[in-house]
Image (cartoon, rainbow, N blue to C red):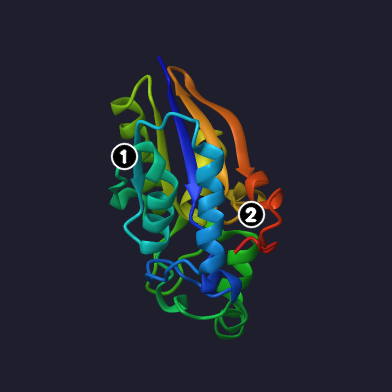
Amino acid sequence: MSTKILIIRHGETAWNRGQIFRGTYDIPLNDNGKQQARLAAQLLKNIKIHAAYTSPLSRAKESAEIVTDSHGISPVVHNGFIDMDYGEWTGKEDSEVAKLWPDDHAAWTANPHTVRPPGGTTLNEILNNSFTAMEKLAKKHDGETIAIFSHRVVNKVLIIAALSLGLERFPFIIQGNCCINEIERIKSGYLIHSINDVSHIKNAGIDLLQADF
């Protein structure tokens, strides 16, 4: 048997548009983000989703609720999929962080797996937390399809782990708002069906931020 896993990033927020570090700060979806979630719901409406799990942050929870509304299921909050904590960077624009912490910001841009934002967490800690959670859910839902609603950083590290890559590949994976990734847990590992599918947003002519932030 196998488990199909849909890994979905939340819709857009004002802080995505402003390139502000969000992390564990609970910033809600903006109107564009809600529309993106509705488009993801439309794309997935004919796919049987047996269970859904979401980060506790409202931008992920609301995206999950919109997408699963027609599936007759309620998303379950799972702390394993909460966003990275950026510590003192939280609430600051990317450009401001670059001025205040130039060395750390440069490393975050080029080699983010080597950086711990002051007072925050690391990519490796997020990987250990989220991948352990996904593995347990894949085992629990053998033979079913589940959806995980999370964040840019979490999605990236889950995909990296599924591909058996190192965290140094983090900058080379893109996760647009409300993108859909489809992977499949089989006995010997993971099959990758799609990564960063945003066709439902582009085809509808809805604004999609180009920056991976």
Looking at numbered disc 1 in the image, what kind of residue is underneath it?
Answer: Ile
Q: Choose between 44 and 79: the one closer to the eye.
A: 44
Looking at numbered disc 2 in the image, what kind of residue is underneath it?
Answer: Pro
Under tag 1, what secondary structure?
A: loop
Q: Choose between 163 and 72: the one closer to the eye.
A: 72
Asked if the residue at tag 1 contacts the one at tag 2, i.e. Cβ–Cβ closer than 8 Å, the answer is no
Q: Is 37 placed above or below 43 here? A: below
Residue at the disc numbered 2: 171
Give the residue furthest to the front: 70
Q: Which mark is residue 73?
A: 1
User: How far, Cα to Cα, is label 2 from label 1?
Assistant: 34 Å
Tell me, yes or no, if residue 36 can be seen here. yes
On screen, residue 61 versus residue 183, left or right, reads left
Under tag 2, what secondary structure?
A: helix
Q: Choose between 178 and 83: the one closer to the eye.
A: 178
Q: What x and y, as percent, mark residue 98?
A: 61, 79
Q: Earlier in the sequence, mark 2 or mark 1?
A: 1
Q: What x and y, as percent, mark residue 18?
A: 59, 76
Q: Label 2 neighbourhood size at 10 Å, few (<14), some (14-19), many (20+)?
A: some
Q: Is 1 placed above or below 137 here? A: above
Q: Quadrant of the N terminus?
A: top left
Question: Which residue is found at the position 56% from the left and 34% from the top?
Answer: 163
